Image (cartoon, rainbow, N blue to C red):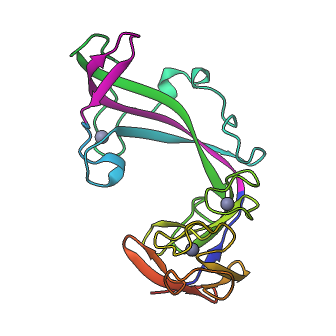
Amino acid sequence: MKARFIKEIGTRGFLRIYWDGCTITKIDEEGYKTWQDHHSCPNAYGRGKPGYHNAQIVLGTNEDMIGDSRAFGRVEDYPDERWPKTCDNCGTPVPPDSSPKNLNEAGIKVNRQIFTSRFYDNPSGDPEPGDIYEMDWHPKCDCPYWDNCEGVHLYALLPNGEHWDLNSRASNCTMREERTHRCWVVNGTPPNLTVNKNGHTCAAGAGSIAVPGYHGFLTNGEFVP
Ligand SMILES: [Zn+2]
Ligand SMILES: [Zn+2]
Ligand SMILES: [Zn+2]
């Protein structure tokens, strides 16, 4: 599969409601509550597993505000009739909030939020399999992996739909204490990238991408299984 380089050009906003049944299992001396979630949606996030119900509708895209969660205002700015009515993943109607307050009491906790996501310059606006994109995700000198990282990491959405941080540390890195090498050495300019072991690197792997469900190489801008 050919790699495509996509750029973040704005922020997409959603009205989102997520909810679940829950029971208060503990209240400590300070009044802090421990909840047990019931995982009442049989198809959470469309993955066929139990979890939260989720309902969201697109508000639109804001191309003046990039990476700004305030691009769509606050929850209070939107009247009740604007909000989604049923779970996207199982069709259950959004119930009224009945959050429990006392020990061993059960109820339904309903949360409303303005959800925002990065908007990219490809047709769908979201990363698709084969897309490579940059993410400015930590301040300089604050990298969890390296001392010589400026903060921008390259990411790929692999052909199988898994995300991969090209600038992360391999789980089988052989130089755990060393913070200047790269487990995957990235050569070229996006999207024509080749990832291999040609450079300051460790002995992990052969420059291949190995994540759950995908094993392959990125060579001359192409994902090769
Ligand atoms: Zn559901
Ligand atoms: Zn970094
Ligand atoms: Zn390494």
Q: Which residues are magenta?
A: 9-38
Quadrant housing residue 37: top left
Residue 46, percent from left and from top:
33, 52
Position above or below: 32 against 64: above
Position above or below: 51 against 19: below
Position above or below: 47 against 173: above
Q: Quadrant of ligand 2?
A: bottom right
Residue 144, percent from left and from top:
61, 56
At 25% from the left and 45% from the top, the residue drawn is: 50
Q: Is residue 93 magenta?
A: no
Residue 125, percent from left and from top:
61, 59
Looking at the image, can residue 128 be seen?
yes
Looking at the image, can residue 96 be seen?
no
Q: Residue 149 vs residue 219: left or right? A: right
User: Toward the viewer: 25 or 59?
Assistant: 25
Residue 48, percent from left and from top:
26, 53
At 33% from the left and 23% from the top, the residue drawn is: 34
